[in-house]
Image: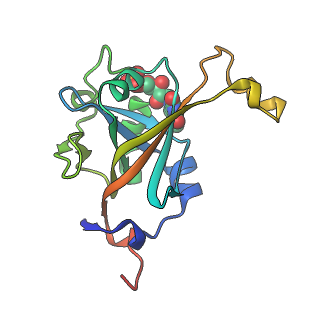
């Protein structure tokens, strides 16, 4: 694992979100990992960004409101059980670090820690948020994903630090 520039990242964005999933860690005094599988990596406002989508019902949502930073951590398959747990229980009533046995490493660019077991970790500060507005849906099927009407808030994070194992680093880097 070494620190790289975001431009050196060799990533397959569709599989790392949809299949591998990630742990979104928010908060610093009481950081909390939450499983996410919707998100994106790209460029916005001339900066490298990671974008995540968080429903207002999540404990993570309130943590992001308190401190506009997060880390996005992609773990090897051996940690699938931890991802299952962090996507099923809330940090409101469970210490998910203790429950999963996962460890924290201090962030260098943000106060929020990253996950020590990650093979790719991104440290981000929130540049902007956008609220999903159902009035703007053009495909009616999207509304079916919101039976509780808990529309996501979009958190656009500038990637200030990237940590990766070799398989996520472009060969020419
Ligand atoms: C595979 C998977 C992906 C998920 N992706 C998201 C997501 O992108 N956004 C979201 O708000 N919740 C997502 N969830 C649900 C949260 O992880 C879950 O509600 C979690 O318990 C919330 O934790 P918290 O209350 O500690 O924040 C996902 C759950 C799973 C299992």
Quarter of the image with the N terminus in it: bottom left
What residue is rendered at 34% in x and 40% in y? Answer: 70
Of 156 and 99, the residue lying toward us: 156
Quarter of the image with the C terminus in it: bottom left
From the viewer's perspective, is 60 left or right of 36? left
Q: Look at the image and tell me whether residue 89 can be seen.
A: no
What residue is rendered at 22% in x and 49% in y? Answer: 116
- In this picture, is 23 found above or below 117? above
From the viewer's perspective, is 80 left or right of 27? right
Q: Position of residue 71 (x, y in %)?
A: 33, 44
Q: Look at the image and tell me whether residue 108 can be seen.
A: yes
In this figure, which colouring scheme has been used for the structure? rainbow
Q: Position of residue 68 (x, y in %)?
A: 34, 35
Task: Give the farthest residue toward the bottom.
Answer: 172
- In this picture, is 39 found above or below 154? below
Q: Position of residue 49 (x, y in %)?
A: 45, 54
What residue is rendered at 40% in x and 86% in y? Answer: 172
What residue is rendered at 26% in x and 50% in y? Answer: 117
């Amino acid at each position: 694992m070494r620190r790289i520039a975001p431009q050196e990242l060799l990533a397959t964005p569709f599989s790392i979100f949809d299949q591998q999933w990630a742990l979104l860690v928010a908060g610093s005094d009481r950081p909390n990992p939450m499983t996410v599988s919707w998100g994106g990596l790209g460029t916005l406002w001339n900066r490298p960004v990671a974008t995540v989508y968080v429903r207002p019902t999540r404990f993570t949502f309130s943590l992001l409101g308190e401190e506009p930073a997060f880390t996005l951590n992609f773990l090897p398959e051996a940690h699938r059980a931890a991802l299952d747990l962090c996507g099923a229980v809330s940090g409101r009533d469970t210490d998910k670090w203790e429950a999963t046995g996962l460890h924290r490493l201090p962030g260098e660019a943000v106060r929020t820690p990253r996950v020590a077991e990650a093979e790719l970790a991104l440290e981000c500060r929130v540049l902007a948020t956008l609220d999903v507005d159902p009035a703007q849906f053009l495909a009616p099927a999207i509304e079916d994903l919101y039976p509780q009407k808990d529309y996501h808030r979009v958190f656009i994070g500038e990637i200030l630090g990237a940590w990766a194992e070799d398989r996520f680093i472009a060969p020419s880097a």
